[in-house]
Amino acid sequence: MTTAIIVAAGKSERMGPGTDKAFLSLVNKPIVAWSLLAFERSPEVDRIILVVRKDQLVASKAVVQMFGISKIQTIVPGGAKRQDSVQAGLAACDIDTRYVIVHDGARPCVTSEMVSEIAKAVKRSGAVTFGRKITDTVKRVEKGSAVAATEDRDKLWAVQTPQAFQIKILRAAYKALGKKEVTDDCHAVELSGETVKIVESRLPNFKITTVEDLQIAGALLK
């Protein structure tokens, strides 16, 4: 059984106070609905768990009903940090879940084909993520604005979601993490000593964090 956890409980601070970007309108539907539909349409996904802010539980149910998301298992409130929200999703997974796919609800350009690709990849490897090779020159700045070094970009990837795992690997990673903070689930798995593999992303799949991002996504999804 493969369960998707769509995380949409962030503070959306860069969008302005009081804004929940997951429910902002993008073309003709809320941002989070684009991700829900991509996972709904993937034959590799059996169930979906949606994690949102506590004050958006009612709105989330309305979105699920409006767009006919039949695979939804439950909607749960998230935590103060992203990793807390992911763990809330993990706790809601049924006992027969073997694989879990975690996706940021603020990445609306994800497609059902991408979801299916990562779902198949995790059955060959215990932990996988989408990512793109970095093409810009990357500088390391350790203090102020002074460049400390130029990194070897041939070894650098920008990581995205969806990220997929054997559920036992992700649960064990978070259990071992303690109070450490991570910015994505792969980092937690890496710290636990497991190997993470990258599936190259060939399509736009950026995360919406600013109004400008929203405008770009709107142009792509029309």
Image: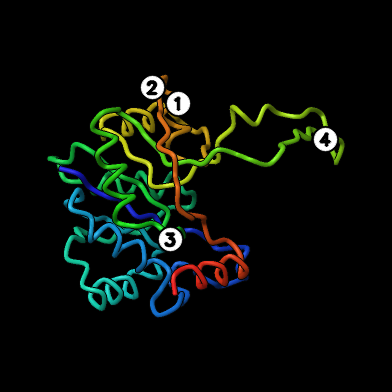
The quadrant holding residue 212 is bottom right
Give me the C-alpha separation between circle 4 and circle 3.
35 Å
Q: Nearer the viewer, mark 1 or mark 3?
A: 3
The three-letter amino acid code for the residue at tag 4 is Lys
Assess whether mark 2 and mark 1 are in contact (beta carbons under 8 angstroms).
yes
Q: How many residues crowd around disc 3 within 10 Å: few (fewer than 14), some, or many (20 or more)? A: many
Q: Secondary structure at mark 2?
A: loop
In this picture, residue 155 sits left or right of residue 120? right
Give me the C-alpha separation between circle 1 and circle 3.
26 Å
The residue lying at 28 percent from left, 77 percent from top is 62
Name the residue that disc number 1 marks. 190
Name the residue that disc number 4 marks. 143
- Tell which circle, 4 or 2, labels the residue nearer the N-terminal end: 4
Query: Looking at the rendering, in which quadrant would you find the N terminus?
Result: top left
The residue lying at 43 percent from left, 69 percent from top is 31
The three-letter amino acid code for the residue at tag 1 is Glu
Give me the C-alpha separation between circle 4 and circle 2.
32 Å
